[in-house]
Every structure is written in structure tokens, then in C-alpha cells.
Image (cartoon, rainbow, N blue to C red):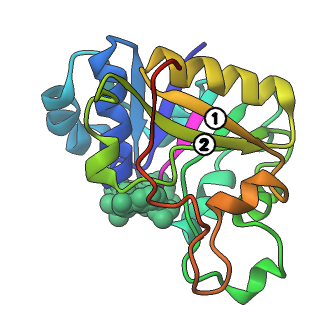
Amino acid sequence: MSYAIVGFGRIGQALAHAFARKNIDVTVASRRPPEALEPQARAIGPTVVAKSLREALEADTILLAVPFGEHREVAKVLPSWEGKTIIDATNAFPVPEELGGLPSSAFVAKAFTGAQLVKGFNHLGAATLATDPVVAGGHRVVFLSGEDEDATARVEALAKQLGFAPVKLGKLDEGGALVHARGRVWGPLIFQDLFKKEP
Ligand SMILES: NC(=O)c1ccc[n+]([C@@H]2O[C@H](COP(=O)([O-])OP(=O)(O)OC[C@H]3O[C@@H](n4cnc5c(N)ncnc54)[C@H](OP(=O)(O)O)[C@@H]3O)[C@@H](O)[C@H]2O)c1
């Protein structure tokens, strides 16, 4: 598996710390050129490498950490997303009317035609997500939801590799509703910093 983090702000850097902690290679990208991101990538760890957006999107698994409205711009970069897994860490808040009642990640999935999308790593504040998930005698919980069980299982394996305790919630409009916002109200699992004794 190859990994890229698109969006290298608060959440993108928090995720990069998780990869660096476990010495897992990950490329990072944003709209800025790689030279602009490289010092921060290097500061996080040697396995974190800045690339151009297009090069980063060669990875088979892409963690999306851009402002919600920007997902469309990222989606436009590739003509097809066939074979890719998108891990959607974005939140839409307050929920824009254009979603027409869809969970925000289902709306994002429509833009990435052909990809498998799993929502995850979106429920914690960036400062919390950036810290070692192995604490308090347990592993920090991340919630995963998505339509495709195989893709969710792949992201579950990655989350475990990173030291988190993944909890699968089911499909986006089922258990996944717990980690989405509705209108101006966050889902009940958003910001819940939970730990499991065994991942
Ligand atoms: N902050 C939190 O605590 C938190 C918690 C949970 C979830 N989230 C969600 O995570 C996402 C990112 O939030 P954040 O706080 O990390 O935001 P942020 O600090 O503003 O970072 C956003 C990043 O996205 C990049 N970006 C923007 N448009 C882009 C595009 N079209 N293509 C490629 N890169 C683009 C920006 O870099 P350039 O300007 O260089 O392109 C920047 O690196 C949001 O959807 C947010 O709702 C945030």
C-alpha cells in the first residue's frame, strides 16, 4: 500500500505525525509546491515526503485533509479514481444546503468517481489526533464508516498499524451518521476522545 495525505494543515500534519511515529512512508501535498511543504514534512519525520499534488495522488490510499469545499478541486485532478481508496477526514460544518440531506462523506464520494471512500480520522481535534494514540493503557479510538467492507477493512488495518483502535460504525447513513454533523449540530461521537484496552 502507498499513502498520501492531501492537505497539510492541522489535520494533515496530525496524520503525518501518526505515520512518522511508526516509520511508515507517506507523501504530503497541498496546492503549494513541495518545496514549501518540505521543511515542515522533514521536521515531522524522515518518512514524510512532500510532493506535488499530482505526484501524491499516485498513491493508492489518499487521506483527504482539506477544507470540505475543496474536495471538488482535489477530485478534478485525476480523470478516474478507479482503484483508489479515499480516507475522508473532512467535516462539513455547518452543513451546507447543497448536500441535500446526504451525509457529507457521501457527497464527497460522488466527486471521486470510482474510488472507495471511508470516513475516518475526522472526529478528534487536530491537537489530540497529533499525539501518540497509545496512552492510558489503551489505544485511542477512531471511527470508520463507509459503503465498501473491503475498503473499510483496509483502513481498519492501517489505523491499527498507526496505533489507533478502529471502531467500524457501518455505512455512512447508518452508524456513520454519528460522526457527521446535521445542520449546526455535531454528531454525538464527534470530539469523543475514547480509548480501548485492546485494538
Ligand atoms: N482542525 C481540526 O481540529 C479538525 C478536526 C477534524 C476534522 N477536520 C477537518 O479536516 C479538514 C482540514 O482541516 P484543517 O484544520 O487541517 O485545515 P487547515 O489547517 O486549514 O489545512 C487545510 C489544508 O488543505 C490545503 N488545501 C486547501 N485547498 C486545497 C486543494 N484544493 N488542494 C490541495 N490542498 C488544499 C491547505 O494548503 P494550501 O493552502 O497550501 O493548499 C492546507 O494545507 C477540514 O475538512 C476539517 O473540517 C479538522
Establish whether ligand 1 lies closer than 8 Å to the Cβ of label 2. no
Separation of residues labelled 2 and 1 (CA atoms)? 5 Å
Mark 2 Cα shell of 10 Å, populated few (<14), some (14-19), many (≥20): many
Q: On the rendered image, what quadrant is the N terminus found in?
A: top right
- 166 lies above or below 153: below
The secondary structure that dominates the magenta segment is: strand
Q: Which residue is mark 1?
A: 167
Relative placement, left or right, of 153 versus 21 is right
Type of the residue with mark 2: Phe
- Highlighted range, magenta: 62-66
Total numbered badges shown on the rendered structure:
2
Dividing the picture into quarters, in which one does residue 54 lie?
top right
181 displayed left or right of 49: right
**For the residues bearing labels 2 and 1, Cβ distance under 8 angstroms:** yes
Disc 1 crowd rating (10 Å Cα; few below 14, some 14-19, many 20+) is some
The residue type indicated by label 1 comes to Val
Snapshot quadrant of residue 83? top right
Tell whether position 124 is magenta: no
Q: Is residue 23 above or below residue 4?
A: above
Q: Residue at x 55, y 64 (%)?
A: 91
Q: Which mark is residue 143?
A: 2
Q: Quadrant of residue 189?
A: bottom right
Please state which of residues 165 and 196 is positioned toward the viewer in this rendering: 196
